[in-house]
Image (tube, coloured by chain):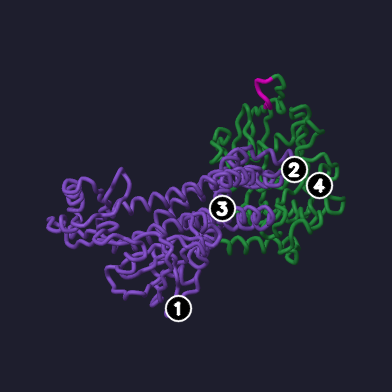
Chain colours: A purple, B green
């Protein structure tokens, strides 16, 4: 066993010195390989962290949101609906919600106006999301005017800014009192945008959903798990699209790596001949080349992954954020919670390190099985 | 020590350009002596040397090393025998460029799994014996022809083989370096090693260092001549 380990150490030593002797080729390969791992790992780390972030933020939202439909489109919930649901078994809490969109022609951006259930906001006052704080330069105590769809100008005093931790979903929020909301949008009294329902037992959520459809046939219940699934698929779709765009780069790398790995130079072939003539077995030559492929790809993998980690979690994914984050005028600015998924790392490892290592072995097999006497005749 | 029985070797067998390089060779190499295979180009001496050194297998015939038939062994076992029992010195030296003299010397020791410190110790002793200790860390491409050959000899000896095989070893050396090389061979034979070389250089063939000369022509052994070794 000790001899085997010693032999592998010798082979790694020789491989390292071979790589050092072919600096240009080795460095070029390492740089391109590292770049590829960096891009793939960046996309993968970012989407994974984004999905986790969305899941974390949505964890506090209601299990079911009920919307009323007319001709398949979302309509206001008329008075009496909240009371109708009121005594449904399994429903822990029920709440009519008021929210809507407002287009700000100054910034050419949409805001979400909302009446919060968990905090009281006095009439004439608002609390804004972090993106508004940045883009409109708002701070507590500032006044801001919005022109309602009726043409009237409404002025509000900013009394607070929402926490940055929830920016992924609160960037464009404007929280206001119910009276201000109804006045601003000329929202009819007793009507709501939708109804939020909290269900204590997760097993009961689907049952409650079915009961809601029976009791209010003109409404549609949206379950939180469906929202989560939609978020996941949106991020997956964007990740997939980005990877599809990158596939050309991956293919180019494949060709590059194959050429580099497969194209044994005359010098390398000569070396293999010498090694065989002085007593190296075919297996020793292949093991040596295996170490070469493995060391290059492992080093590239580690460098690329660490660089991707720094890019995603310290530089906020600056290079690709606009593609993956979404299309909006007000980009949320948020630091993702660093998170590494073992399966994800393993997948990336398998798809980057193994193919290259294997690609180095195929041509070597041919070169390594040549008769050792050829070196005598060269 | 090393015996060949009815050795025939064909290249491109079964094809239109089939060529028989050796046509039935019988010979016995004596131990601890210097033997030379001589003959003109195309006589088959290098082919014979590759078979003697287990670098190639004969198409027909038997190769026996210390009485054991090794001609039918699979490559793995043949490599093991080659590594343990043979050291090679090539015409072009065949050193690995970019590596230092000492790193070239220890290369044949890598597959044996011998600890590096032990290999280095052996290599340093060999370098000192060849008066090359001062060139230990020099890259081989910086060495002179004579120095390169001495490094090649050290490399051939690193696994302490019983048999040393050299193909046209003086082809790239001047007369002075050739004489120095032959003196080294004499020392090695006197230390108990068997030396086999090919050459058509009269300086080698007629040297007092040589014990036996095998003459080849057209793939056949035409003469075997024993010459008395000169007194040291």
Q: Chain of mark 1?
A: A
Q: Characterize the magenta stretch by its predominant secondary structure.
A: loop
| A124 vs A112, nearest the viewer | A124
Magenta span has B148?
no
What residue sits right under mark 1 in the picture? A142
User: Helix, strand, or loop for circle 2?
Assistant: strand
Do the CB atoms of the residues marked 3 and 1 lie less than 8 Å apart? no
Circle number at residue B225: none
Circle number at residue A36: 3
Q: CA distance from mark 3 to mark 4?
A: 52 Å
Q: Which residues are magenta?
A: B10-15
What residue sits right under mark 2 in the picture? B167
Q: CA distance from mark 2 to mark 1?
A: 94 Å
Name the residue: 78% across, 31% down: B42
Task: Kindly report which numbered mark, 3 or 1, lies closer to the viewer in this rendering.
Answer: 1
What residue sits right under mark 4 in the picture? B170
Task: Kindly report which numbered mark, 3 or 2, lies closer to the viewer in this rendering.
Answer: 3
Can residue A35 be seen here? yes
| A155 vs B102, nearest the viewer | A155
Residue B26 percent location from the top left of the image:
67, 30
Name the residue: 39% across, 69% down: A165
Q: CA distance from mark 4 to mark 1?
A: 96 Å
Q: CA distance from mark 3 to mark 1?
A: 48 Å
Can residue A339 be seen here? no
Q: Chain of mark 4?
A: B
Name the residue: 47% across, 52% down: A348
């Amino acid at each position: 066993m000790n001899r085997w380990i010693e032999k592998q150490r010798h082979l790694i030593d020789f491989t390292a010195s071979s790589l050092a002797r072919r600096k240009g080729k080795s460095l070029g390969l390492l740089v391109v390989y590292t770049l590829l791992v960096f891009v793939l790992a960046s996309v993968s780390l970012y989407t994974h962290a984004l999905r986790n972030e969305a899941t974390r933020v949505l964890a506090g939202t209601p299990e079911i949101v009920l919307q009323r439909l007319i001709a398949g489109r979302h309509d206001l919930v008329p008075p009496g609906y909240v009371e109708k649901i009121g005594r449904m078994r399994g429903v822990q809490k029920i709440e009519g919600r008021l929210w809507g969109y407002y287009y700000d022609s100054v910034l050419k951006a949409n805001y979400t106006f909302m009446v919060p259930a968990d905090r009281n906001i006095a009439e004439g006052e608002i609390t804004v999301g972090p993106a508004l704080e940045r883009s409109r330069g708002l701070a507590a105590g500032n006044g801001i005017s919005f022109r309602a769809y009726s043409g009237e100008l409404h002025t509000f005093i900013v009394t607070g800014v929402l926490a940055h931790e929830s920016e992924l979903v609160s960037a464009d929020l404007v929280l206001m009192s119910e009276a201000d909301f109804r006045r601003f949008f000329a929202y009819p009294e007793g009507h709501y945008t939708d109804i939020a329902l909290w269900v204590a037992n997760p097993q009961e959520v689907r049952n409650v959903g079915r009961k809601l459809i029976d009791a209010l046939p003109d409404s549609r219940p949206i379950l939180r798990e469906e929202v989560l699934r939609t978020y996941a698929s949106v991020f997956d779709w964007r990740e997939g699209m980005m990877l599809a765009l990158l596939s050309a780069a991956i293919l180019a790398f494949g060709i590059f790596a194959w050429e580099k790995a497969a194209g044994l130079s005359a010098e390398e072939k000569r070396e293999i001949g010498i090694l065989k003539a002085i007593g190296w077995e075919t297996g020793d030559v292949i093991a040596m080349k295996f170490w070469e492929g493995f060391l290059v790809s492992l080093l590239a993998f580690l460098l690329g992954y660490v660089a991707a980690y720094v890019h995603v979690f310290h530089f906020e994914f600056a290079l690709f954020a606009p593609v993956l984050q979404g299309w909006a005028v007000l980009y949320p600015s948020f630091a993702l919670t660093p998170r590494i998924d073992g399966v994800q790392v393993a997948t990336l490892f398998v798809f980057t390190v193994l193919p290259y290592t294997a690609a180095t072995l195929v041509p070597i097999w041919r070169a390594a099985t040549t008769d050792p006497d050829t070196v005598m005749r060269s | 020590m090393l015996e060949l029985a009815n050795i025939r070797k064909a290249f491109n067998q079964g094809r239109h350009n089939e060529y028989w390089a050796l046509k039935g060779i019988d010979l016995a190499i004596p131990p601890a002596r210097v033997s030379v295979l001589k003959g003109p180009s195309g006589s088959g001496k290098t082919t014979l040397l590759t078979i003697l050194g287990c670098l190639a297998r004969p198409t027909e015939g038997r190769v026996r090393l210390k009485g054991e038939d090794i001609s039918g062994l699979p490559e793995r076992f043949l490599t093991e025998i080659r590594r343990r029992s043979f050291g090679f010195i090539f015409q072009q030296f065949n050193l690995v460029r970019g590596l230092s003299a000492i790193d070239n010397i220890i290369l044949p020791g890598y597959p044996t799994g011998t600890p590096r410190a032990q290999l280095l110790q052996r290599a340093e002793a060999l370098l000192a014996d060849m008066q090359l200790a001062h060139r230990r860390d020099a890259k081989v491409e910086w060495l002179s022809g004579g120095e390169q050959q001495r490094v090649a000899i050290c490399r051939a000896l690193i696994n302490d083989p019983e048999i040393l095989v050299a193909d046209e070893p003086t082809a790239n050396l001047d007369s002075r370096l050739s004489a120095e090389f032959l003196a080294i061979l004499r020392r090695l034979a006197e230390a108990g090693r068997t030396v086999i070389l090919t050459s058509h250089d009269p300086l080698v063939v007629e040297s007092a260092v040589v014990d036996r000369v095998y003459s080849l022509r057209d793939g056949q052994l035409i003469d075997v001549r024993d010459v008395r070794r000169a007194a040291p």
